[in-house]
Amino acid sequence: MSLILLVCLLPETLTTNATAYNFNQATPYWRTLLLVYKNIDVSYTDGDGQARHLTHSLPEMEITDGVNAFREYAALVYEGSDRATFSQIDIIYVDRPLSSLSALGPNLWWPSPTDTALELNSYVTDAYDSVLVLWPQTNFSTGQQIPSYWGLGMEASSWSAGATYGTVANAPTWMWEIPTMGEPWLHEWLHGVSPFFANKGFAIPENNADGASGHGYERSPTTGWMAYYHDLMTGQVLEDGQLMGITAAAWQTGSIRGNWAKIFADYFRTDSLSSYEVQGEVIWDEEHGRLQLNHSTSSENKLYTPITAAGNFIATGRFYIPTDPGPYDSLALAISNGSVEYWATLAVGTALTEQNHISIMRNDAWGILHPLDLRPGWYTVKMQSDALAGLLRMKAWPDGENEPDWQISRSIDAGWLAEQIGFRNYGSANVMVDDLQMQITSHHQNIYLPFVQR
């Protein structure tokens, strides 16, 4: 086991040229958990050896910044590995305060697996390949700061419940955003993943995630160290005349827990709209890496990408509920076979009798309604197809809250199979969407059990 330091990142038309996404090969994926400690109540000694105590709660914006960067980490894993692997992410907001820290050296501290053992034992054992921790190091309103490093990462061991382990502390917004959102989390994750593959016999460059400068790479003002991380995750780092890193063949040997699934994912970091059938007005937002479903030319805007997904799957998407929804607005994660569409719908329209409910609609017909206080902000929507039970299930929850159990279900038409996945927006408000994903696995129990906090 080793600790590694982070050195401190359309018009009203129907486009029909999309190519079907074929799930013809399973992808090994890493299931990664982010533990968010919103509160801290610890004693420590400062750099002068003076006894100190910090009791602090993270402001909402500092939590949002760290979590948003974590979501971008998942995109960096998928794209940086040339889609050879995938990170399935979960987030748990921990209610209890972080009540202890471990010594890294004289008057130097961090939240080690000893300090997070309650959560590791509750959630991680045999479930996650990687654990990352967001913790309150600094009270920026007073300037009090626990002596530590911004980020630390280590390989998997029994100390960390068999998962790789990394920590990153709270920081100002600009530290998360320059130049590549998600880079700090990727860096610490690679410090755990690289030794895992080195122990399997694959050639990993010296200093793994810290090896960029030593291998001749320079930090880009626009992409940071991503050129190096890409080469590290694709086995293209040159060292002593040999290409090293985590090759596609290495990824194919599997993750710590041996997770495999057939995966489609689009994080919209590039303009991929040519791969979708678009109706109405859908615009790629290059600055933020997401889509806008606008209302200026159409009250119904939707996009689908063709897929071949028989039977069981889980689909997810992200939606931003606007502050000024119109009278009949609804947002949906959409699945279709070309004629019958199922929409995992958020009813936000101010004149809708269904307002502040979610429902699985079939075409334009509402299903059973489940009450949910739909406030402005980002929501995750998840839909599960269970062919054995003949059901679609749905859940939705806002950022800042833990994922719930399945909230609602609806019977699937006999013989119906998903052939398209996408988003739908109906109404007069502009809507932002992001992070469209679908997973299929032959291991029913690995993907279809609801997220449970044990």
Image (cartoon, rainbow, N blue to C red):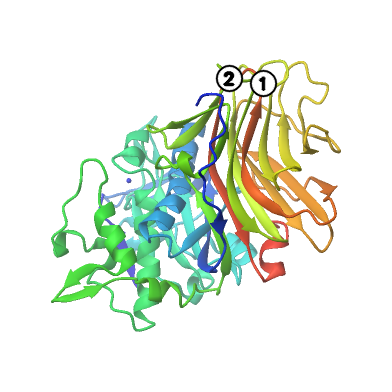
Q: Would residue 1 be seen by someone viewing this image from the given angle?
A: no
Residue 274 numbered tag: none
Check contact, mark 1 vs mark 2: CB within 8 A: yes
The x and y percentages for residue 159 are: 49, 72
Q: Is residue 296 left or right of residue 241?
A: right
Pick the front one: 13 or 332: 13
Q: Would residue 132 be seen by someone viewing this image from the given angle?
A: yes
The x and y percentages for residue 219 are: 19, 49
Pick the front one: 142 or 333: 333
Dot 2 amino acid type: His
- Element under label 2? loop
The earlier-in-sequence mark between 1 and 2 is 2
Residue 427 numbered tag: 1
Between marks 1 and 2, how big is the CA–CA gap?
7 Å
Picture quarter with the N terminus: bottom left
Residue 295 numbered tag: 2
Dot 1 amino acid type: Gly
The x and y percentages for residue 308 are: 62, 58
Which residue lies at the image location 64% right of the left edge and 66% below the top edge? 441
Which residue lies at the image location 61% right of the left edge and 58% below the top edge? 439
Picture quarter with the C terminus: bottom right
Which residue lies at the image location 73% right of the left edge and 29% below the top edge? 373
Q: Is residue 231 left or right of residue 354?
A: left
The x and y percentages for residue 70 are: 46, 48
User: Is residue 270 positioned above or below 14 on the image?
Assistant: below
Pick the front one: 22 or 294: 22
Q: Is residue 173 left or right of residue 418?
A: left
- Element under label 1? loop
